[in-house]
Image (spheres, grey):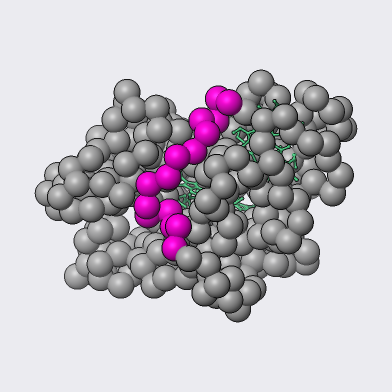
């Protein structure tokens, strides 16, 4: 896969995502693709800006304060459709994301993603190459009618199907200290599954309202903020009862770690119901903590991973509990996460922010003995 991208990127003149381009606003797509539009609005791609994502905002504000930076370098991936993106990314550009600039609020917009022609690989972070034609969109429909609004390129753009379209922003992000802050396994083809097939499955409802189809590709981008129920089938939980103890097995059938962003904390909760009593086991935490000098540090300061207990790609993790299960016990096992590690809430000023403090239940199993 990597070879193909390199080849493609060598052949194409630069029209990259760190430059400013004009994109049709996503609201233009609503008229004919209302289902896809509605899903997109609820997704983190539709809400990736500092005005719409309080977690992103708080991290950015702390970083801005601590590093005294004058540029919003995050824009390369968080507001790539900004009309003055080039200025946002330059040191003295002094362009910050504005609430009243519609192009700053588009997020990873429909037209942006559908104009990614290829991906250039770079050490710090990759770069998307954007097609010059503003009104021709890459897609994958085997059969389609013409669109009265835009051209369609359905052939020869495998990247829309195999997940390469995602890795311009998702493969890795290196900080100044050469530490990879956040990465996804880009060799993501696993048993035929990839970023698109897992995160954008086919769901009921028509692609457009000009031509009725049974299904369309889900554009709510199932992930850790929302629709995680669509992904729970990729992680299996089982329980093994032994004479004096029991083991909970977590089988991660995903090509990347269970959680990717260093802010996350995964949690395994186990409760045993015995008669009218509930006995809670000590919660098990899954984290990847970045740090400096042996202490946890924010992503822009950190130069090492100081602790990594995250469940990794394709890992089968076994957790032993020294507890003897009795007949007629009921064991409830819950796997879930906090989007922001509870210990970081105070520092980030996120204590009263629901999205940062709530516990998301990803998968729940109950075993009767
Ligand atoms: C190379 C692309 C890229 C750049 C540049 C980038 N990000 Fe991100 N960011 C991402 C991706 C992809 C995610 C989603 C990761 C995930 O959910 O695991 C993300 C997620 C986040 C999140 C989690 C948001 C949430 O709601 O949980 C925070 C916080 C964040 N980024 C902060 C920043 C800040 C601050 C900057 C700029 C200093 C920045 N990012 C620059 C790609 C990028
Ligand atoms: C006036 C109606 C109309 C508008 C507005 C519109 N589209 Fe479409 N689009 C269509 C039709 C019709 C199709 C073909 C659907 C089919 O055959 O099932 C289509 C197909 C597509 C495809 C699929 C291409 C493929 O081969 O997979 C993409 C991608 C797409 N549109 C993106 C967009 C984006 C992005 C916008 C907004 C910037 C937009 N459309 C606005 C009518 C429209
Ligand atoms: C232009 C950059 C960019 C591209 C291209 C991109 N993403 Fe993202 N993606 C982001 C950013 C930035 C975030 C985090 C937004 C936030 O939380 O504020 C994100 C978040 C996500 C999330 C997390 C959603 C959640 O609920 O937490 C998933 C899943 C995701 N992207 C999947 C994909 C897939 C699949 C593709 C390819 C089809 C893709 N992304 C392409 C930038 C991008
Ligand atoms: C992060 C990238 C990304 C964003 C943002 C995005 N799409 Fe897509 N879209 C894709 C990918 C990838 C496919 C191909 C899926 C496949 O082949 O299974 C696709 C498929 C489609 C199709 C083809 C029909 C179908 O259902 O498969 C249409 C139409 C479409 N998108 C319209 C839109 C519209 C309208 C928006 C905004 C409301 C949008 N897309 C936002 C990545 C994106
Ligand atoms: C086999 C299915 C599968 C494949 C392939 C896959 N993912 Fe995931 N992804 C998951 C599961 C399961 C989760 C965890 C549950 C959740 O976040 O809802 C997840 C979570 C994520 C998250 C949220 C992580 C966080 O910390 O917030 C992002 C972003 C993401 N995946 C992006 C990608 C990208 C980009 C690719 C392709 C390079 C990809 N995934 C490939 C299944 C998959």
Image side of residue 113 versus residue 146, left or right: left
Image side of residue 36 versus residue 179, left or right: right
**Segment colored magenta:** 14-28
Instruction: Report x, y in % for residue 109.
Output: 52, 38
Instruction: Report x, y in % for residue 64.
Output: 18, 46
Task: Report if residue 225 is visible in the image.
Answer: no
Q: Quadrant of residue 303?
A: bottom left
Residue at 66% across, 49% down: 138
Question: Looking at the picture, does residue 42 appear above or below residue 228?
Answer: above
Q: Is residue 113 one of those drawn in magenta?
A: no
Instruction: Report x, y in % for residue 159.
Output: 66, 60
Compare residues 145 and 218 and report the one nearer the observer: 145
Residue at 32% across, 41% down: 84
Residue at 53% across, 63% down: 119
Q: Quadrant of residue 173?
A: bottom left
Q: Is residue 26 one of those drawn in magenta?
A: yes
Instruction: Report x, y in % for residue 297.
Output: 24, 58
Compare residues 158 and 173 and report the one nearer the observer: 158
Compare residues 204 and 70 and report the one nearer the observer: 70
Task: Report if residue 121 is visible in the image.
Answer: yes
Q: Residue furthest top?
A: 31
Residue at 67% across, 30% down: 149
| Quadrant housing the N terminus | bottom right
Image side of residue 257 versus residue 47, left or right: right
Q: Magenta residues: mostly which secondary structure?
A: loop
């Amino acid at each position: 896969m990597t070879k193909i991208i390199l080849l493609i990127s060598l052949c194409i003149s630069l029209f990259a995502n760190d430059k400013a381009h004009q994109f049709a606003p996503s609201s233009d797509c609503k008229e004919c693709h209302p289902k896809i539009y509605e899903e997109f609005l609820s997704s983190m791609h539709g809400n990736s800006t500092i005005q719409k994502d309080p977690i992103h905002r708080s991290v950015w504000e702390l970083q801005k304060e601590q590093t005294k930076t004058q540029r919003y370098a995050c824009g390369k991936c968080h507001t790539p459709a900004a009309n003055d993106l080039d200025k946002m990314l330059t040191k003295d550009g002094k362009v910050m994301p504005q609430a009243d600039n519609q192009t700053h609020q588009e997020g990873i917009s429909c037209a942006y993603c559908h104009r990614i022609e290829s991906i250039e690989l770079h050490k710090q972070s990759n770069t998307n190459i954007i097609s010059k034609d503003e009104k021709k969109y890459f897609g994958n429909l085997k059969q389609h009618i013409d669109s009265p609004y835009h051209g369609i390129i359905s052939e020869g753009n495998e990247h829309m199907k195999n997940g390469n379209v995602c890795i311009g922003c998702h493969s890795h992000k290196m900080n100044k200290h050469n530490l990879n802050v956040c990465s996804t396994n880009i060799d993501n083809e696993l048993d035929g599954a990839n970023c698109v097939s897992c995160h954008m499955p086919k769901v009921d409802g028509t692609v457009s309202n000009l031509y009725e189809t049974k299904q369309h590709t889900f554009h709510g981008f199932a992930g850790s903020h929302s629709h995680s129920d669509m992904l729970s089938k990729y992680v299996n939980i089982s329980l093994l009862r032994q004479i004096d103890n029991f083991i909970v097995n977590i089988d991660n059938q995903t090509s990347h770690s269970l959680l990717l962003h260093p802010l996350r904390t995964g949690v395994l909760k186990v409760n045993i119901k015995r008669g009218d009593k509930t006995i809670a086991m000590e919660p098990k935490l899954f984290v990847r903590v970045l740090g400096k000098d042996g202490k946890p540090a924010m992503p822009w300061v950190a130069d090492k991973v100081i602790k990594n207990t995250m469940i990794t790609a394709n890992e089968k993790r076994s957790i032993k509990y020294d507890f003897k299960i009795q007949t007629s016990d009921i064991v409830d096992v819950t796997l879930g996460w906090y989007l922001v590690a509870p210990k970081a809430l105070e520092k980030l000023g996120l204590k009263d922010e629901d999205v940062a403090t709530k516990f998301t239940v990803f998968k729940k199993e109950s075993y009767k003995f």
